Image (spheres, rainbow, N blue to C red):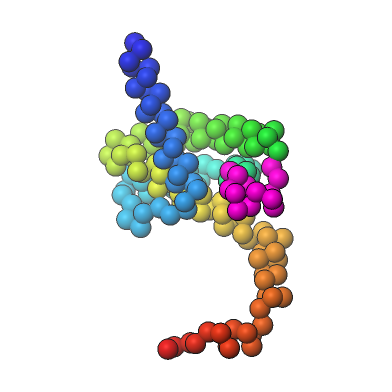
Amino acid sequence: MTIKRICCAKSRTSITALLILGLLTFSPLAMSGEYTDRLSNCLLTATTDQDKLSLVKWMFAAMALHPAVDGMADVSLSAREQANREMAELMIQLLGKSCFSETRQALQNEGSLALQTSFGVLGQVAATNLFSDPNVAAGLASIETYISAEDLENNIEIGQ
């Protein structure tokens, strides 16, 4: 009994790690299989706008831990825990209920990489939502105040 529990716990941990890696890398493999595509489509259709916002919050809370942005992003422990809870509930809902059949078929036929790839697709959609927000887009565009066309012409040789 104990060995089975340890095995299952290790399996769940590695699957969770693959899902998280897929979400945070945003780089699903260009060649995905039929079952991975079905799972990806199910994840996309099963997530609501609120689910995608939960995903964005979770990703931001995780990224805020990077030392490069430590002084810029201050996410409280309670906010990070809330984001983790929401994301865990979403993953359980998607994999265990909404897309259970697609998840099982993808795992059986294409292995755990199917989960990483499918959640990578979902992560890309969440990132697209994040970056298409008018406030975020304006923040990204504000770099133009520091770069002039003349600076670009003087420092970039095009076509050589």
Q: Nearer the viewer, residue 86 or 3?
A: 3
Q: Residue at x 44, y 40 (%)?
A: 19
* Residue 69 belongs to the span the image colors magenta: yes
Residue 42 appears in the figure:
no
- Name the main secondary structure of what is drawn in magenta: loop
Left or right for 10, reference 54: left
Q: Residue at x 36, y 54 (%)?
A: 29
Q: Nearer the viewer, residue 95 or 70?
A: 70
Q: Quadrant of the N terminus?
A: top left
Left or right, 21 with respect to 53, comes to left
Asked which quadrant contains residue 14, the reply is top left
Relative image position of residue 144 (x, y in whole percent): 68, 75
Q: Which residues are magenta?
A: 62-75
Please, is residue 58 above or below residue 69 in the view?
Answer: above
Q: Is residue 66 magenta?
A: yes
* Image: 66 above or below 82: below
